[in-house]
Amino acid sequence: MKKKTFRIVFFTMLLLIVVVLLVFKKSLFFKESPFDNKGYTTLINSNKESCLQCHINTSGYSKYHNPDVIGCASCHLGNTKTSDKDESHKGMVLIPGNLADAKETCGVCHPDELFKIENSLMTTNSGLVAVDKFIFGEVNSPDIQYHIQDIKNSPSDKHLRDLCANCHLGAEKKEFGEITQLSRGGGCNACHLNYSKKAKKDLSNYHTSNKKELPTIHPSTDIFMTNTHCFGCHSRSSRISSNYEGWQETLLKKDAIKDKTGYQVFKDERVYVYKGEDVHHTKGLLCIDCHSSHEVMGDGTNYSHEEQAVSLQCSDCHYKDKPTTVVYDSLDKESLLVFLHRDYTHSDKPILAVKKDMHPLVNTYVEATGKVYLIGKKDGVLHELKPQSEVCSRDNAHKNISCAGCHSSWTSRCIGCHNQFDKNEPEGYDLLDKEYGTGQWKEYVAEFSSSLPSLGVRENKDGRKIEPAMPGMILTIDKGSYSGKKIGEDVSFHRLYAPNSPHTTTKEVRDCKSCHTNATTLGYGKGTLDYSVENGIGKWIFTPEYQNNPNDQLPEDAWIPFLIEVEKEVINSTRLDFRPFSVKEQKQILLVGACLHCHQEDSKVMQQSLLNGIEPLLKNLNKNCILPTWDK
């Protein structure tokens, strides 16, 4: 009996334990998602919406934007309480997500993200407007805050409207269809809209049937962006997107490259030549693998220029001593959403964080072994992130040079640009207001080319850093042509370089001579820079490739004159905190170049200079060493 009683009690207890486990299994065995859709869905009861009475058997939605979860009206608005076609469509937004209606659509569930987007540079274009107005002489600083949609019709404003104002998130997406190389703006759609092959086919059938055959496959609104989402806008100006994929723009027409290899014609019929892609692109990494939502959407701050909005540094992944990390439980709401939507599982591992502002890179983690991995957002492939090489970490002589200064293989160059207003242009098009009218600013470019980046100096409250630079605005502006004066009567000339992030990263670094004996790097423009030694006297001689521009008697592509100090009041940069090398700095660079005239860069003496600089070595010169003479 005792044995039987024991069995009864035992199995009763076991049954109670099983019941308890079944009731509480979610909390006991599964880590609770930080989201239960409260605050991310509207109070609409999708079962009572009339939309799906006509739009039946639809699919293609992303998991978290399915009508079963959030209804249809949470995005498209309209009247969901009637089956009458006209009544139900009153107040409906066919293409939700444009910033004009985002407060009533996307912003209802995502108010924080909308606030950030509305204040981001991709929406305001503040830096673009400020630099243009600065160069036109309408303001005295390129750092004033603007919003592209507030510009009027000054000469600079009209210049922006005619040539630049297409690329901002406030531009409205008016047509159904996927995001392509030709897409501009579209608010939330610019990044979050995706069409499957079936969705594109359904849309095509809808158009060919005269809008009678309603699509059953809905495009997806999700976080799975591709590089195409970035390309439309970021293949302009410094051309980061096209550079990243290895393509340099040319002035060729598509007929000129027929049957030629190494060229590509993009959707807008611009012709590109292949120069070499970024090493991250060769690994299959997307733009958003590095530039997460925290940078792409912004942090709500009104920045003056894009480099201020970008907090990510190469050293955040390729760290020097140890990586900066955060734990899963400390992730912010936005990062948790990305983690959830991408079905990541590394909640038990440290996650890399950006040192400048500590925003997390949720597609990374650190193993207990110390190895760091990045999960490719394109294909889920694991990439081991390597720390800085010993050369980078121990090199004291170059510690104030940005990673891109050494690891960029090429950057775009644009010279000989002339801007003139044609008051008689019958089909002038205002990119901001999307209206045709008479009169248009026109841009005439002399040459597109590429080279190793030039280098310049960034000096501000954060310190001194040497960064890549490119000839961004070597141009003339015929301001008189806009104000009614004769052509050529009021022309201003500008020789401005811009700080540049080439996005043509290579594992290998540029060699020593490519900086210390390279005319383009130092800002003199293309040409030959020779170290001549005669009768025991060493001198540097520069022979430019281009003729002098009559406006300032400098070579057409130059930034500064050869070993001649530029007057402080001369404006030669698109930033107030970025400048070319001073003559003193040029001499320091060329001094090392003179040593490289005899010594190989891997020689003992040159390797010693990396640790402690060149100055200690000058105290023990060999009698055969001939240093430069700087006298004319």
Image (cartoon, rainbow, N blue to C red):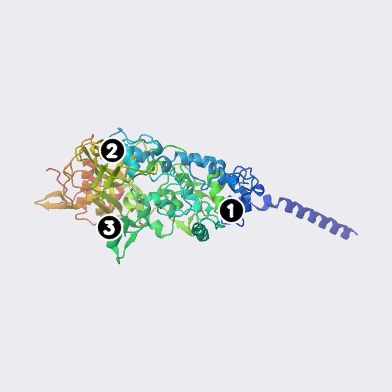
Does residue 125 appear anywhere in the picture? Answer: yes
Q: Mark number for residue 135?
A: 2
| Residue 583 picture location, percent across and down | 21, 41
The answer to which of 605 and 555 lies nearer the viewer is 555
Q: Mark number for residue 252?
A: 3
Alpha-carbon distance for marks 2 and 1?
48 Å
| Residue 70 picture location, percent across and down | 61, 47
12 left or right, relative to 394? right
271 left or right, relative to 35? left
362 left or right, relative to 475? right
Disc 3, SS: loop
Q: Is residue 20 above or below residue 481?
A: below
Of all residues, the one furthest to the left in this rendering is 535
The answer to which of 204 and 138 lies nearer the viewer is 204
Q: In the figure, residue 615 lies in which quadrant?
A: top left
Question: What's the amino acid at mark 2?
Answer: Ile
Of all residues, the one furthest to the right in this rendering is 1
